[in-house]
Amino acid sequence: DVKVTQSSRYLVKRTGEKVFLECVQDMDHENMFWYRQDPGLGLRLIYFSYDVKMKEKGDIPEGYSVSREKKERFSLILESASTNQTSMYLCASSLMGQSNTEAFFGQGTRLTVV
Amino acid sequence: QQPVQSPQAVILREGEDAVINCSSSKALYSVHWYRQKHGEAPIFLMILLKGGEQKGHDKISASFNEKKQQSSLYLTASQLSYSGTYFCGTEPYYNQGGKLIFGQGTELSVKP
């Protein structure tokens, strides 16, 4: 059974903390994504990675950075968490360069910044 | 830039039909459709590639008009299990490496 695993389902962090959200996939996919999901706004792309150490900004990268040191792992970093980053974060992965393949999603991490 | 989905929400009775639309301001290479149930991860439904193809999966089908940069998802004879939020994901023509930009979602509720 294919899997995208996010390290935490729920996180509560304080304003100004550095926050790491981890995502691991076991399908040997080249592409990995971080999305943020907010009511009425859908899934907004934060960052996209198409290979180890390769990344591309999405629509809302401000306040976030990413790290991909190994193919199976893609980390989202909030350098200094703020309350407006309270949200559901979804990680996904897919095969590279093949538009007829689906993206697989993790269960999501609900982050609350207080 | 996010594609625009319409309607934002729809309520159906079992057995009724629905259409969900997805429009992009950019030329598209492909359109993906996903369904997300409350508290769960989005699940893939289908992909449509350029060429104006139409696909079907049980009683759910979709079309893709690349000239209009639009896709539509058709749900016929809806079942209670169809309830959830539907997202279209678009792959821009200029960036075909699989980068997906999703719409804001359409919430579908099917009542008995």
Image (spheres, rainbow, N blue to C red):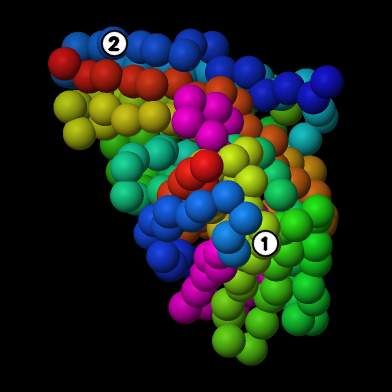
Question: Would you name the residue on which mark 1 appears?
Answer: B76
Inspect the image, locate mark 1, and give the three-letter code of the amino acid beneath it: Thr
As helix, strand or loop, the secondary structure at mark 2 comes to strand
**Circles 1, 2 touching at the beta carbon (< 8 Å):** no
Residue A112's quadrant in the figure? top left
Residue B7's quadrant in the figure? bottom left
Q: Residue furthest bottom?
A: B67
Q: Residue at x 19, y 27 (%)?
A: A82
Q: Residues within 10 Å of mark 1 (few under 14, many from 20)?
A: some
Most foreground residue, B50 or B12? B12
Q: Residue at x 70, y 67 (%)?
A: B62
Image spot of residue B83 (x, y percent): 54, 43
**Which mark is nearer the camera, 1 or 2?**
1
Circle on res. B16: none
**What is the chief secondary structure element of the magenta stretch?**
strand
Whether the magenta-drawn stretch holds residue B38 is answered as: yes
Most foreground residue, A39 or B58? B58
Inspect the image, locate mark 2, and give the three-letter code of the amino acid beneath it: Val
Question: Would you name the residue on which mark 2 appears?
Answer: A12
- The Cα–Cα distance between marks 1 and 2, rounded to whole angstroms, is 42 Å
Q: Is residue A59 visible?
A: no
Q: Is residue B71 above or below residue B33?
A: below
Q: Is residue A104 left or right of residue A17?
A: right
As helix, strand or loop, the secondary structure at mark 1 comes to loop
Q: Is residue B56 left or right of residue B71?
A: right
